[in-house]
Image (cartoon, grey):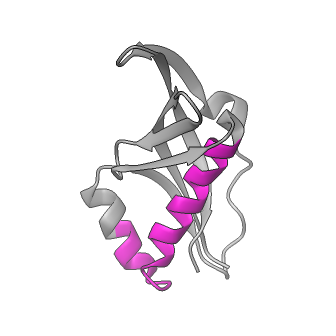
Amino acid sequence: MAKVYVQIAIETEERADRWACRSPEFGFTVYGKTRDAARQEVNKALSALLKSFHGDLDAIERFLKKREVRFYDIQRDHQSPPAPIDHARARIQYGIRSGPRPASTEVSLEEVLVA
């Protein structure tokens, strides 16, 4: 199974009845009843998006470069796994204001299965 590691911004906002997570790099918004549920939907959306390339890892790499998304090690089956990721260091959180409710943005390193 091939994997890609992408570093993206995730804007998280509490709404009246749910949480929303938006990816500015990819232009999608996902929702969940809780913050964690919405956050999990981000990875599902990324996975669906990158799986739409049907395992063409070169096309995925070109797509990510065109979108100016920082990515690490598109891992192909025959490669050894990349160095362990320090997820605590990969996540940087800071607050922003957008609209009547405060939102936050984090930079997150996501591991996505692509084939």
Residue 29 locus on image (x, y percent): 43, 47
User: Can you see residue 107?
Assistant: yes
Q: Is residue 73 above or below residue 89?
A: below
Residue 79 locus on image (x, y percent): 66, 75
Helix, strand or loop for the magenta stretch, by majority: helix
> Is-magenta flag for residue 42?
yes
Residue 109 locus on image (x, y percent): 58, 44
View extreme (front): residue: 17
> Is-magenta flag for residue 96?
no
The quarter of the picture where the C terminus appears is bottom right
On the picture, is 62 further left or further right than 28?
A: left
Q: Is residue 38 above or below residue 79?
A: above
Question: What's drawn in magenta, residue-wise?
Answer: 37-61
- At horizontal 49% and vertical 44% (from top left) the residue drawn is 7
- At horizontal 52% and vertical 60% (from top left) the residue drawn is 45
- At horizontal 61% and vertical 30% (from top left) the residue drawn is 91
Q: Is residue 100 above or below residue 69?
A: above
The quarter of the picture where the N terminus appears is bottom right
Residue 61 locus on image (x, y percent): 38, 67
Q: Nearer the viewer, residue 50 or 4?
A: 50
On the picture, is 100 further left or further right than 15?
A: left
Q: Nearer the viewer, residue 99 or 51?
A: 99
